[in-house]
């Protein structure tokens, strides 16, 4: 599934125009490694592998066993109005806030002017594709580690001045005219899914509820999913997050709801909507409860308002994932899209029953 920015503009406001003339070819990966201080002999012998999707991403493996990931803005990404400004700011902020640094991979080179970031690569066995099909994924230990990471992120950045606003525009879909909906890169399939969402009274009401209760307070990743995480099973288990392009000032409940949504959506994507219990309260299984408890241990989150925001953000993020899937498959009627929409509807219809269970999971045990 590709990463898709789902946003909604207020009526009457145009999208910012692309400025193709301002785009400059970014430095080559070897030049970036040179700027990062990597030894010349290693750079010359490095094996480069292109991992690009929307941005230009290169894995550089050196003969000594070390490896780096170089991420740059591609011409197409720039033309679509995308940048690495938010991502670079998150890494720069982490350079002077150790608590935040523990949540991100290690950056070895940041260049805001040329829109380049270089990171230490992680073992392939610590990435989602190597672990997602293991029995019982995510384990309680990994879920706890993700909860700790999110709690550390939000606690470390509460009240910190931020340059960008996090992307969670899906919550505004019901009240945004169709011509002002920004879905991926103009995906017709995803736009068709927005029509289905807006036509569903239960889903539309839940999105309006989310838009009304969101309370921005800190830096949020805004695209939390297991595919954007480094998963070190330990012991002790540790999770860090990458792909901070959508990050910015936002409601921490968005990240927590996103973590729950991605965990449920994994089962739905693999086995269909009927693979999850009819009673949405049962979706708070031991890993989900462990994630929430570990999060609450790092930040004061256990109140009714936060639990409500997590619950409605959980629904909103399920819909965001359905839109991503429609965009990447170029099919609004793809079976996985239908299953995600059905699952989101079931959760939305039971939101008030799920809320107390979320609050209990967030409440520290005496």
Image: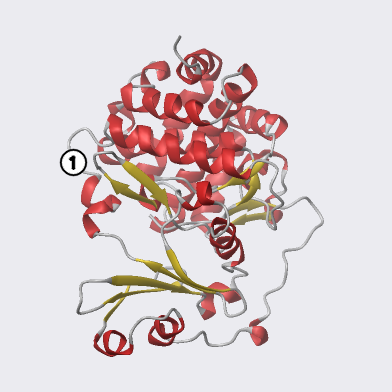
Depth order, front residue of 339/241: 241
- In terms of secondary structure, where does tag 1 sit? loop
Find residue 218 and report its horizontal and vertical position in percent. 64, 43
Mark 1 = which residue?
134
Of all residues shown, which one is farthest toward the top? 366
Residue 182 found in image quarter: bottom right
Find residue 296 and report its horizontal and vertical position in percent. 50, 26
**Above or below: residue 116 compared with residue 196:** below
Tell me if residue 263 can be seen.
yes
Q: Quadrant of the C terminus?
A: top left
Depth order, front residue of 207/120: 120
Find residue 163 and report its horizontal and vertical position in percent. 70, 58
Q: Residue at x 72, y 48 (%)?
A: 177
Q: Residues within 10 Å of mark 1 (few under 14, many from 20)?
A: few
| Left/right of residue 286 with respect to residue 99 in the rendered view | left
Q: Residue at x 32, y 65 (%)?
A: 121
Q: Report the number of numbered marks.
A: 1
| Left/right of residue 225 with respect to residue 286 in the rendered view | right
Find residue 266 and report its horizontal and vertical position in percent. 32, 39
**Above or below: residue 110 compared with residue 42:** above
Of all residues shown, which one is farthest toward the left? 135
Tell me if residue 334 can be seen.
no
**Above or below: residue 244 compared with residue 354:** below
Q: Quadrant of the N terminus?
A: bottom left
């Amino acid at each position: 599934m590709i990463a898709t920015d789902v946003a909604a503009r207020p009526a009457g406001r145009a999208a910012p125009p692309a400025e193709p003339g301002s785009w400059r070819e970014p430095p080559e990966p070897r030049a970036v490694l040179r700027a990062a201080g990597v030894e010349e002999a290693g750079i010359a012998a490095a094996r480069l592998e292109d991992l690009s999707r929307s941005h230009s991403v290169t894995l550089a493996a050196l003969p000594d066993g070390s490896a780096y990931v170089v991420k740059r803005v591609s011409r197409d990404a720039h033309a679509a109005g995308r940048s690495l400004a938010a991502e670079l700011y998150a890494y720069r902020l982490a350079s002077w806030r150790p608590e935040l640094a523990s949540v991100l991979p290690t950056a070895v080179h940041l260049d805001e002017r040329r829109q380049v970031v270089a990171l230490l690569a992680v073992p392939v066995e610590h990435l989602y594709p190597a672990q997602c099909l293991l029995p019982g994924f995510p384990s309680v230990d990994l879920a706890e580690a993700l909860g700790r990471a999110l709690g550390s992120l939000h606690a470390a950045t509460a009240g910190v001045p931020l340059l960008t606003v996090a992307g969670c525009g899906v919550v505004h879909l019901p009240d945004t005219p169709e011509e002002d909906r920004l879905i991926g890169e103009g995906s017709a399939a995803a736009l068709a899914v927005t029509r289905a969402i807006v036509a569903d009274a239960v889903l539309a009401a839940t999105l309006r509820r989310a838009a009304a209760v969101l309370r921005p307070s800190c830096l949020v990743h805004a695209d939390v999913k297991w595919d954007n995480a480094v998963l070190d099973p330990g012991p002790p288990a540790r999770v860090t997050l990458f792909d901070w392009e959508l990050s910015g000032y936002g409601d921490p409940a968005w990240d927590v709801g996103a973590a729950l949504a991605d965990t449920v959506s994994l089962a739905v994507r693999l086995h269909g909507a009927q693979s999850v219990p009819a009673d949405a309260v049962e979706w708070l299984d031991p890993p989900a409860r462990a994630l929430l408890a570990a999060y609450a241990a790092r930040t004061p989150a256990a109140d009714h308002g936060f639990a409500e925001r997590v619950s409605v953000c959980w629904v909103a993020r399920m819909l965001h994932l359905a839109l991503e899937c429609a965009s990447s498959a170029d099919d609004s009627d793809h079976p996985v899209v239908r299953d995600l929409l059905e699952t989101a509807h079931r959760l939305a219809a039971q939101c008030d029953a799920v809320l107390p269970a979320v609050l209990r999971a967030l409440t520290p045990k005496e």
